[in-house]
Image: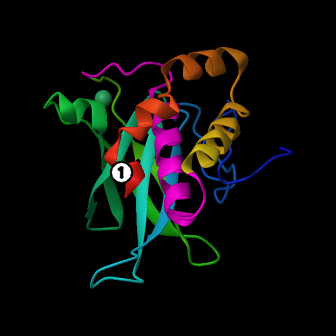
Amino acid sequence: MESSNDDSFFSNSSLATDADEAENVDPNVPEHRFNIKKHTTKTGKNKGQVRTLVTLTIPPYSFKKKRVNKGNTVTFSCNGCDKLDTPNYALAASVADDTGNEVFKLKSWPLKHACSPSSTDHIVRDFRSTLYAMVHKNPTRPVPSIFDEVREQITSKLTPEEKLAFLTEAPTFDEMKCNPWLLV
Ligand SMILES: [Zn+2]
């Protein structure tokens, strides 16, 4: 593998995070990725506190962390199925890597979904959350330039078909501008 940034997009061979060596990869495990983002609280009584936000993507489905169970497993629930009131869960084991960072291993995942996200739904989600993180990290930088950079960064990792679908579906800057969180 020549590029191995932790923000690299899916390829058929990427089954887990980079921290996870490809040992005994079960061919039945679906393509997936755990997205780990650190968020520093900027204001209020928890100022300076670093929170780790973990989400799981099993294209085209996106999951959010639901709860931590006994025995260090973590339950994730499908966002699309949640909206339809038909909760659907994936389970991952949480382990520490050599450097003490928390990494996840997918243990089980739903085979059926009530939801049917579009093929690029997870990419649009990633775009939004990357944009959100960048805007918060660079509060003095003009949002339009961050918007263009993130879009460029995301599309550069897509196949031509994915890129076309993504650009058709991704919100434009004008659409996002109306989104209050961008102005926070
Ligand atoms: Zn679902």
Q: Position of residue 37 (x, y in %)?
A: 50, 61
| Number of marks in picture | 1
Residue 124 belongs to the span the image colors magenta:
yes
Q: Is residue 31 visible?
A: yes
Colour convention: rainbow
Q: Quadrant of the N terminus?
A: top right
Residue range corresponding to the magenta coloring: 114-142
Q: In the image, ligand 1 is in what quadrant? A: top left
- Residue plotted at (32% across, 47% down): 180
User: Which image quadrant is residue 163 in?
Assistant: top right
Quarter residue 6 falls in:
bottom right
Give percent across and percent down for residue 132.
Answer: 47, 52
Work out whether residue 143 or residue 86 is closer to the camera in this orientation and state it.
143
Query: Residue furthest toward the right?
Result: 2
Name the residue that disc number 1 marks.
181
Indicate the quadrant containing the C terminus: top left, top right, bottom left or bottom right: bottom left
Q: Is residue 130 above or below residue 45?
A: above
In the foreground, 61 or 121: 121
